[in-house]
Image: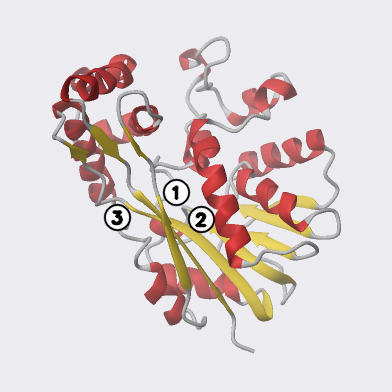
Amino acid sequence: MSGAHGRLLVVSEREAHRSARQPASKQRKGGEMTNGTVEEVIARSREEVDQPGLLARAFEPLTRTLFAEAGLQPGMRVLDICSSVGDVAFLAREIVGPDGHVTGFDSSAATVAYANERTAFRGLANVNFVEGCFGELPFGQDFDAVVGRLVLMYCRDPVADLRSVVSYLRPGGLVVFQELDMLPGKTVPPAPVVDDVRAWLLDTFARAGLELEMGPKLYATFEAAGLNPPEMRVDGFIGGAESVAPALVAEVARMLMPQAEALGTVTAGQVHIETLEERMRADLATTRGVMSTPLVIGAWATLPH
């Protein structure tokens, strides 16, 4: 992916699947998320493999609402940016229906192959994935809409990368992106275990050079890329010990652990990842508090005629 920190694992279903590139000796068993290679995953049961992960399931209703509000319509031709294994593309296909078409791209050949395997398993003739990078795709003004989820936060030059994909839109075409604002998340009252995890996650993201506030920066990014001023919405997750929030944060921490150690942020011995979710829930139960996650911010705009 041109100009992007594509190797850092972050809070996204895209990176959840990329974390599946660990040696086979580190695979989990049964129904747990595998740490095998993408090729090894493809070889497993299609019914087992073709299931969205926890993060994808959590984001799905937020992205669906965003697409509906932004005006994604049946019959549209859609380009999904940095698709990974296709969760966003498959959601877009549900909206554009059998008369539309969705094309996704990713820089990883193995990931593209896996996404196309999922497409075949679902029997979808109007979804396809190609290998490619920003600025290097073989398209003309072929699309009615460009969509992306948790993509621009990785880009060293999000304006240039957005401008490159906007060039594939017809005049008046629609652009819809969903990104994070990582800074607002907090616990009320303070909960030591949760707050410690949040601190080292943010430190790791910052050391890796990710944009922590890409969500609110979508407005300026859209305008700089030549789009009309965008409309925006904000979503997020908040709750106590029984909510999904501890599971989401624990999943991100698990995926980020190798990078956190490599960057010197924290060690596995300090985190004790296998019990982290349980300890966060216990922490919130003790304080009778709530935790909120980063904000999920959507923006949509059209290309001027």
Marks 3/2: CA–CA distance: 19 Å
Q: Quadrant of residue 39?
A: top right
Residue lying farthest front? 288
Q: Residue 250, relative to residue 15: is it above or below? A: above
- In the image, taking residue 79 as reference, residue 204 lies left or right, namely left
Residue kind at label 2, given as amino acid type: Met
Q: Residue 24, relative to residue 207: is it above or below? A: above
What percent of the width, then of the height, locates residue 158? 42, 67
Residue that mark 1 sits on: 6
What percent of the width, then of the height, locates residue 111? 62, 40
What percent of the width, then of the height, locates residue 68? 62, 59
Residue kind at label 3, given as amino acid type: Leu
Q: Nearer the viewer, residue 110 or 283?
A: 283
* Closer to viewer: mark 3 or mark 2: 3
Query: Is any atom of residue 47 visible in this view?
Result: yes
Residue kind at label 1, given as amino acid type: Gly
Residue that mark 3 sits on: 212
Residue that mark 2 sits on: 1
